[in-house]
Image (cartoon, grey):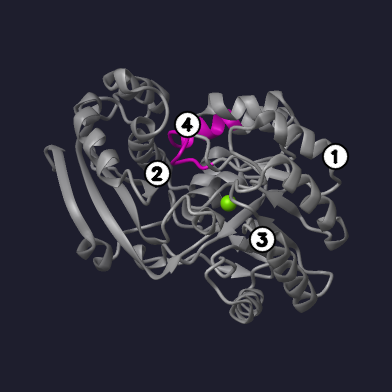
Amino acid sequence: MSSDSIRWVRFSHVRLPLATPISDAKVLTGRQKPMTEVSFLFAEIETRDGHQGIGFSYSKRAGGDGQFAHAKEIAPAILDEDPSDIGKLWQKLVWAGASVGRSGVSTQAIAAIDVGLWDLKARRAGLPLAKLLGAYRDSVQCYNTSGGFLHTPIEEVKENATRSLENGIKGIKIKVGQPDSRLDLQRVETVRKHLGDDVPLMIDANQQWDRATALRFGRAMEPYNLVWIEEPLDAYDVEGHAALASALDTPIATGEMLASVGEHMELIKHRSADIIQPDAPRIGGITQFLKLATLADAAGLQLAPHFAMEIHLHLAAAYPAEPWVEHFDWLEPLFNESLETRDGRMRVPDRPGLGITLTEQARRWTVASAEFGKRG
Ligand SMILES: [Mg+2]
């Protein structure tokens, strides 16, 4: 069997504007400014035999230019290589930029290529990515996040929740972590009352509590039957999370801000979370996510990947224990295809690969692009 080879790669830096400036607890505590756009790094790959793949990574607030710049510097390392040998190519890309480390901007740039190679492999096999990996289910229960941010007045949060449920989404997550916890308590009470007892509800403090506040608020939350409390503490406080997870009946979820499998291993080792929330683009792509998923499964953890449902739906479908996928409508203008939600679940598309193609609008939002190699 003769092997194929990568002959062309194009990177596009796309800036997706958000309809409304977005605030979570990090804005209310003064650590960040409201978010007005999300930067995407798309990698389009083509092989000598004419197979194609598309992958993406992203960055919020800062880092979009950095991801694009790093990808350009390391890209020549994969030209003429066999696109099937994804693990080997991941290592080659890491070594090409080894002096800037194995997490953060460097591996987030690699993630776009890695996701593109997995998309290519699945498309060549004629299978949805979930099927290529080995799916446990053809749909994943999903919950909405984009309707419950802190800049949104509570009446609107309630309307957004109702609309999500009507659109076939099963659970509702709202943001907490404001400097005045009483305001958080009021919002949780109001939303729980609005939803009734049967709708799955989650809360997310975006790392803005100290240990005492997290424990007090977590205890006050026990009667609300939450599916989880997300990021109660600083993302790297593995011991604090472990103490909280053992003190509370409500499950603890965290991990979205971590930037490598190694960082996630600390969470697993310390039993810091009941539900792990990796983000494939943030930890270096699908190759890394799969390693982590194996470790998390072996440790008996539940999985609820962060953001990027277009990628994570496939990865969650291939996780043994019933996972959750996070529904965000922000990325919809970027893709010609939309994901179907019905009866509380997001369906894995039957299109090969990730099942996404870029819209003309995404092309118009492209602020920079660079090509390597030659297209056929
Ligand atoms: Mg979160």
Q: Residue at x 61, y 34 (%)?
A: 293
Mark 1 or mark 2, which is nearer to you?
1
- Provide the residue designation for mark 3: 180
What mark, if any, has residue 247 been given in the picture?
1
Establish whether ligand 1 lies closer than 8 Å to the Cβ of label 1.
no
Q: Are marks 4 and 2 in contact (CB under 8 Å)?
A: no
- Provide the residue designation for mark 2: 119
Mark 3 or mark 1, which is nearer to you?
3
Establish whether ligand 1 lies closer than 8 Å to the Cβ of label 2.
no
Which numbered disc flags the more N-terminal residue, 1 or 2? 2
Residue 120 vs residue 341, the one in the foreground:
341
Mark 3 or mark 4, which is nearer to you?
3
Establish whether ligand 1 lies closer than 8 Å to the Cβ of label 3.
no
What mark, if any, has residue 92 been given in the picture?
none
Q: Are marks 1 and 4 in contact (CB under 8 Å)?
A: no
Relative image position of residue 366 (x, y in whole percent): 21, 57
Q: CA distance from mark 2 to mark 3?
A: 45 Å
- Provide the residue designation for mark 4: 287
| Stretch of the chain drawn in magenta | 279-292
Q: CA distance from mark 4 to mark 2?
A: 12 Å
Q: Amino acid at mark 1?
A: Ala
